[in-house]
Image (cartoon, rainbow, N blue to C red):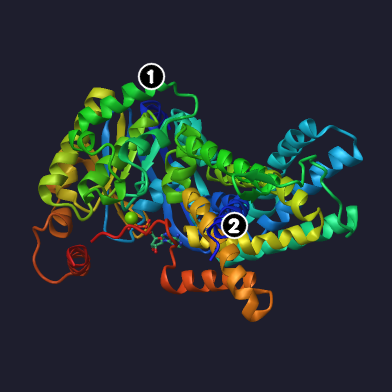
Amino acid sequence: MDWIFLTELAINGALTGLLYSLVAIGLVLIYKASSVPNLAQGGLTMLGAYVVLALSRDAGMPLWLAIPLAAVIMFGMGFGIERVALRRLAGRPVVMILMMTLGIDIFLIGTTLAIWGGTSSSMNLGISYEPLLMGDIFISRIHLVGAGVALSLFAAFMLFFRTRTGIKLRAIADDYMASWSVGISVERGVGLSWALASLVAVGAGVIWGEIQGVDQSLSILLLKGLTVAVLGGLDSILGAVIAGVIIGIIENVGAEFLDQFVGGGSRELIVAAVLILTVMIRPHGLFGRHDIERV
Amino acid sequence: MPMQEKVEAQSILSMNSVEVLYDNVMLAIKGVSVQVPKGKMIALLGSNGAGKSTTLKAISGLLKAERGRISRGEIKFNGTDITEVLAQKRVGMGICHVVEGRHVFEHLTPDENLTAAAPLGMSRSVLNVEKEKIYNYFPRLAERRNSQSGYLSGGEQQMLAIGRALVTQPSLLMLDEPSLGLAPFLVSEIFDILQKINQEEGVSVLLVEQNALAALEIVSEGYLIENGRVVMHGTAEELKSNSDIQEFYLGGGEGTDFHNVKHYSRRKRWLS
Ligand SMILES: Nc1ncnc2c1ncn2[C@@H]1O[C@H](COP(=O)(O)OP(=O)(O)O)[C@@H](O)[C@H]1O
Ligand SMILES: [Mg+2]
């Protein structure tokens, strides 16, 4: 076995995994506030990419302006989604909210198809496709940038959840009734979690849009993001980051060995196996909180 | 009625003939009137299902979280009609409701529980002063301020729920069965602290209790609620010497009347 090759597979796998974490972090943010896996996170990622594209390619803005502006727009959009689609469902069974997020996902796919059509466009970030040579190992530059974005967002959220607003958001995740009783606006908190998840979706959309082109297939990232989030524990941002790295490595290294036997498609099988095994063996994931039980 | 106006003027809270409907059909309280004089401690007594919690939720606005609404009557706080005011606004006005069942934020530390309740406009230094004051009232909490709240004992969680309410700087503090499931020495510890808070901070207190014996020791007046109606109102002394109250709520009576059976089965559940 060639160790250098194996290391290269592992490192690039870890970087790709962190890009899955970008999607998973958005899922975790909303799960924390509403106890619902947001099935629209893939759609939001796709929308984030389209909004950047609309501002940069269609409106002619430079990327350094288009990306932050898209972030602001999507942030507001997140609040809007809560206000229009979710507030009326407060207190309803969780499965209704889940179905609503699925509806939002389908709606976003349909809307982007109607506005921008289905042909793939490129993001044109201007990052070289020439791999970076570190020692004897080739590393993809865009993946490196994306991993940096994921880790920065992770650090930012760790800090945010220690601020007063962040603590109030965690309080909402714990107990709606108690939150209301001390004057915390649960509705605004849930809105904020959607806004933050939509903000993260811009980061994920830009990176993934650069890697695989901007079209509706970006929404399928939900499946990878969801798998990572479930392995990480659904309500743990740290879990989403670590699970992303783990899944990325297993997927990249595993596929290299398995593909010769099953002839391609082993990536999907590996991810499916991780999801199924997690749910069977460790349903609250690596870092998910157990519900505290006392007598 | 000039007499009633006078009572209202001295009341921080004045609730008049309030009816509450859940799900638009279930009439839970049927014309409850309660006055809380400024700076006083008042008890709402009554057996399980009488409508005590519903009365508190009507005052705090938390009814909405359970698809309940006030279908008749009005609630005045410091003379202002708050019947239509949002729950979170009422907290800002000075009403705080410690809900039944010790709802602490389990995955937060006690210190973070207190921070979570701080109004966004409260400066960090004011918050720290408030926290120290609360830790002074509840030294047990100070010791465990950085552990996970879900692992606190029942008594500590109740103290935390009360402390967390104090961070909102209420002028009317409402507590729903704070003694539920706690050992008698803890109940008296918590009730002593409530009395101290009432005296030192001038906070008016509306206390819901099934433990009438303990409650009547610290309040000045009490209301007895049964089947969604106030059936008795008097000073703590009057209530303590009332024969019905003695029989049904203070454990003085004998026999197998309905209330006692109900209380007994409930008490057994706490212990199991
Ligand atoms: N969320 C609710 N939905 C429907 N009915 C309720 C609800 N909460 C309480 N009730 C009913 O209202 C009545 C009064 O309940 P409650 O106020 O909780 O009584 P207490 O606090 O005195 O035990 C009971 O008959 C109870 O079943
Ligand atoms: Mg009750």
> Ligand 1 lies in which image quarter?
bottom left
> At x 80% / y 35%, what residue is drawn?
A63
Q: Position of residue A95 (x, y in %)?
A: 58, 67
Residue type at numbered disc 1: Ser
Q: Secondary structure at mark 1?
A: helix
Using the image as rendered, state which of residue A183 and residue B60 is in the foreground.
A183
The quarter in which the N terminus of chain B is drawn is: top left
Q: Is residue B189 left or right of residue B134?
A: left
The quarter in which the C terminus of chain B is drawn is: bottom left
Residue matched to label 1: B125
Q: Position of residue A181 (x, y in %)?
A: 43, 43
Q: Secondary structure at mark 2?
A: helix
Instruction: Give the chain of mark 1.
Output: B
Residue matched to label 2: A13
1 or 2: mark nearer the eye: 2
Using the image as rendered, state which of residue A237 and residue A175 is in the foreground.
A237
Instruction: Give the chain of mark 2.
Output: A
Q: Position of residue B267 (x, y in %)?
A: 18, 63
> At x 33% / y 35%, what residue is drawn?
B111
